Amino acid sequence: MRVIAGSARSLPLKTVSGQSTRPTTDRIKETLFNILQPHLPGVRFLDLFAGSGAIGIEALSRGAASAVFVEKSPAAVRCIEENLRFTKLFDKAAVLRNDVYLALSVLEARGESAFDIVFLDPPYGQNDVERVLEKLADSPLITKDTLIVAEESIRFQPEVLSRLPYEIIRDKRYKTNRHLFLQRK
């Protein structure tokens, strides 16, 4: 796994050993960032269920002003921090070792400004996409202009989101997974 473009282009990234994380392949990451590129310069990026940090690091490398990484696994947090130091992007990042739901509450309590892009890649099939979107629905961490990208299994049925105040603006499908691009209505 590597950084595809930007200031850290071609630098290899460490991954967390074992099956606890599911790194996004370079091909899918490249497709995702071809879609996101026009929105990246100067943004505040929130990477939830961050794993190795590859998505947030790619955003920083391509021009995001800052990124917050949220991951509860101590091994994954160490991996994110090592990757940020290696890519020389550590000064633009904050890493929270916490459960995503608690971390969102902490960010709200701190009075953090709204994020421009929120990326979430939870374990598939555990209703975390729906739960995170419920938590964010009335949160000051997002606005109607915030772009939310949720990665889920190709089998995920986005109709479960119909009761939430979001509009699906794009549904990019791959062989085994999909990226849903959403904004608050």
Image (cartoon, helix red, strand yellow):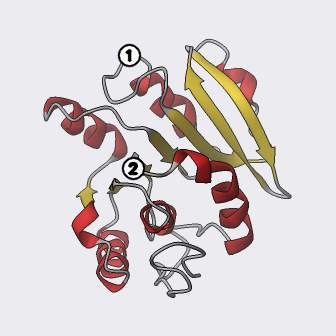
The residue type indicated by label 2 comes to: Gly
The residue under label 2 is 42
- Would residue 94 be found to the left or right of residue 55 on screen? left
Q: Position of residue 56 (x, y in %)?
A: 45, 60
Q: Secondary structure at mark 2?
A: loop
Above or below, 174 against 145 in this view is below
What's under tag 1, amino acid-wise? Answer: Asp
Number of residues whose C-alpha sits closer than 10 Å to that of mark 2, classed few (under 14), some (14–19) or many (20 or more): few
Residue 101: horizontal and vertical position, in percent?
34, 38
> Where does residue 142 sit, x and y in percent of width and height?
39, 28
Q: Quadrant of residue 150?
A: top right
Res 163 quadrant in image: top right
**Residue wearing tag 1:** 138
Give x and y (percent) for residue 175: 86, 58
Residue 109 vs residue 142: left or right?
A: left
Residue at image point 65% right, 64% down: 29
